[in-house]
Image (spheres, grey):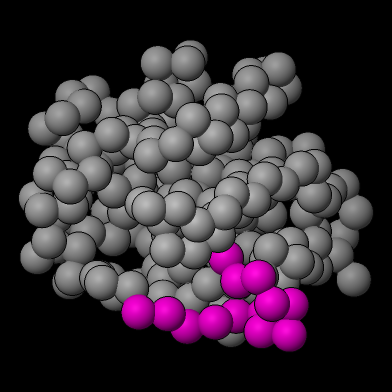
Amino acid sequence: MQLQPGYDVLAETYHEVLPLPYQTPLEEHAVAAFADTVLRRDAAGVVVDVGCGTGGVAADLTARGLAVVGVDPSSAMLVIAAREHPGLTLLRGDARLAALPPEQPVAAVIARFSLIHVPPEELAEVFAVWRSRLPAGGPVLVAFQCEDDPSRPYEEFDHKVARAWRPHPDAMADRLTAAGFAEVWRTISRPDAMHRFPECHLLLCRTEDVPG
């Protein structure tokens, strides 16, 4: 998730069009299931919301009893997040988590519709960083517009704000598995009047074994 001047320019419009953190009940339930998984583990550290945008999901996770740090490359989106959700901890940075202090324990990572902006060839590096920051069993939830055809593992598409790719769910799961994560569950919703593409929520946990 590189610096996105498009999000800086369109931040207020984005917030007006999408003022709520979830567009469907399934999205909300998937995040709630993730939050329950983190709470039951009771591990030390924060939940990092990668690509937190205007802060709605980070605020929801905070209300559910989690310590959350929101990370986003768009300074304008972070201004809105701070305005709409005072008290959130927010950092300007990308999916590699360089903005997060190295001494900060991380209990879990959530990345909803932000990894689509990471070029596919850079995902392995991102996931290696996540694994290095998480304890064994640490949960990761990723959500993304997805591709139906497994013969097209990553399909670039016409995102309105920034360059973006739609992975097939198996392709995303395979990348994370190779980085040392094990899939727990996934959901896939079909396109509708509000969504042009299928969407996947994928929950994984960091394994104890060193990836081969």
- Residue 153 shown in magenta: yes
Q: Quadrant for residue 45, please give it.
A: top right
Would residue 64 be visible to someone looking at this image?
yes
Q: Is residue 81 magenta?
A: no
Report the residue at 21% width, 37% height from top. Answer: 19
| Nearer to the camera, 104 or 163 | 163
Return the x and y of residue 7 as percentages of the image width and height: 20, 63
Q: Which residues are magenta?
A: 144-158
Q: Nearer the viewer, residue 90 or 151?
A: 151
Q: Quadrant of residue 81?
A: top left
Tell me: residue 1, above or below residue 137.
Answer: below
Q: Residue at x 28, y 61 (%)?
A: 73
Q: Quarter of the image containing the C terminus?
A: bottom right
Instruction: Say whether residue 173 is left or right of residue 64.
Output: right
Q: Is residue 150 rendered to the left or right of residue 74?
A: right
Residue 70 image position (x, y, % from top left): 36, 41
Q: Position of residue 66 (x, y in %)?
A: 49, 21
Q: Quadrant of the N terminus?
A: bottom left
Where does the image place residue 39, in percent across and percent down from the top left? Answer: 63, 19
Work out whether 133 lies above or below 125: above
Residue located 28% across and 34% down the image: 20
On the question of residue 43 being in view, the answer is: no
